Image (cartoon, rainbow, N blue to C red):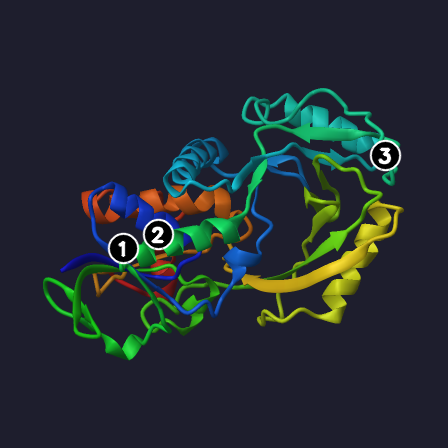
Amino acid sequence: MIDYLIVGAGIAGVSFAEIALQNGKSVKVVDDFSTNSSRIAGGLYNPVILKRFSEVWKAREQLGFSLTFLNALEDKLKIKFDYKIPIYRKFASIEEQNNWFQAADKPNLAPFLSTEIIQKQYKSISSEFGFGEVLNTGYVEISSLVDAYIDFLRINDSFSNESFDYSELADFDSYVEYKKQKFKNVVFAEGFGLQKNPYFNYLPLDGTKGELLIIKAPDLNLDVVLKSSIFILPIGESMFKVGATYNWEDKTDLPTEEGKRELIDNLKELIDCDFEIIKHFAGVRPTVKDRRPLIGSHHVHKKLHVLNGLGTRGVMLGPWLAKELYYSIENNIPPDPNISIERFYKKLGIKK
């Protein structure tokens, strides 16, 4: 009998699989790659909400665990996917500078916000009021991570490229059966695909579509992530990832002219050099209205579990949430009420 069947091979599913393996458990992962928010994500990890200069919830815990976890995974897979790079928030006014300094004085934000205004002049970027530097930041090339991990799973005969068929799942007293194979537990890490899951589709997952561009701009000599209304992330050879849009109505992963135009307009407000669009892509982020993720076990089918709702911060949240869910299942340690699916039970009329 296999310990865990994991549905979904994005950052959430991969993280849970690795934590289970680290603890001596056996896994099987299935995914048909019908949802791709992990693969197209910017992959940035940033402990500060730069729109209003506030700390990401439990940022220190998430960063501390997740970066250590990902660095160990780099060593295991023998590939590089974690790149340390500063994030510069462009100031639009003196008022924004003042707000930055006020935030930097707060004990919870002091480790993450530099108190020095960066006045460096970048070619093709106007910066009258300078930049604020966010510390302890970088990005993960998630597609490289996921591809390498799937290769590792394939070698160990632990991955199946298939659509999950919920009608083939049967819950018995001491195990779960799927396509005549027995498992102790099933973890659903499907991202926006949760909408089709008959066991957990009652949860208030409200996907947010995001579109990004890859551009080539030889005259843009940028060696940091630039953040304003959008972000510009250098990825080498005069190439940059530019994102992202937020669309709460369109739930498809198809790029749109509207999204492209929004990105181009915002980009032209930031840079004044020529650029060529190399690629335009889109995905639906698994977001929750209260901006907290979703982990926990089904109230009736106790061996079925969910790991979802990572939103825009999958790199920081994925490994940390996987650990929290694993301890909940194996050690009966209740997850934080802010991330447990039980926070919705009363509103939905569900009794444990």
Front tag of 3 and 1 = 1
Front tag of 2 and 3 = 2
Say whether marks 1 and 2 touch (CB < 8 Å).
yes
**Vertical placement of residue 282 versus 270, above or below:** below
Mark 3 and mark 1 lie on one chain; the one further toward the N terminus is: 3
Q: Residue at x 56, y 22 (%)?
A: 107
Gap in angstroms between the C-alphas marked 2 and 3: 45 Å
Secondary structure type for disc 1: loop
Residue identifier under label 2: 152
Type of amino acid at the residue the image marks with label 2? Phe
Task: Locate residue 26, reporting x and y percent.
Answer: 21, 52
Gap in angstroms between the C-alphas marked 1 and 2: 7 Å
Quadrant of the frame with the N terminus = bottom left
How packed mark 2 is, by other alpha carbons closer than 10 Å (few <14, some 14-19, many 20 or more), is some
Type of amino acid at the residue the image marks with label 1? Asn
- Residue 156's label in the rendered image is 1
**276 left or right, relative to 8:** right
Secondary structure type for disc 2: helix
Q: Residue at x 70, y 70 (%)?
A: 256
**Vertical placement of residue 268 versus 195, above or below:** above
Q: Residue at x 65, y 59 (%)?
A: 246
How packed mark 1 is, by other alpha carbons closer than 10 Å (few <14, some 14-19, many 20 or more), is few
Residue identifier under label 3: 127
Type of amino acid at the residue the image marks with label 3? Ser
Task: Tell me where residue 279 sits by quadrant.
Answer: bottom right
Gap in angstroms between the C-alphas marked 3 and 1: 52 Å
Mark 2 and mark 3 lie on one chain; the one further toward the N terminus is: 3
**170 left or right, relative to 195:** left
**263 left or right, relative to 286:** right
**240 left or right, relative to 284:** right
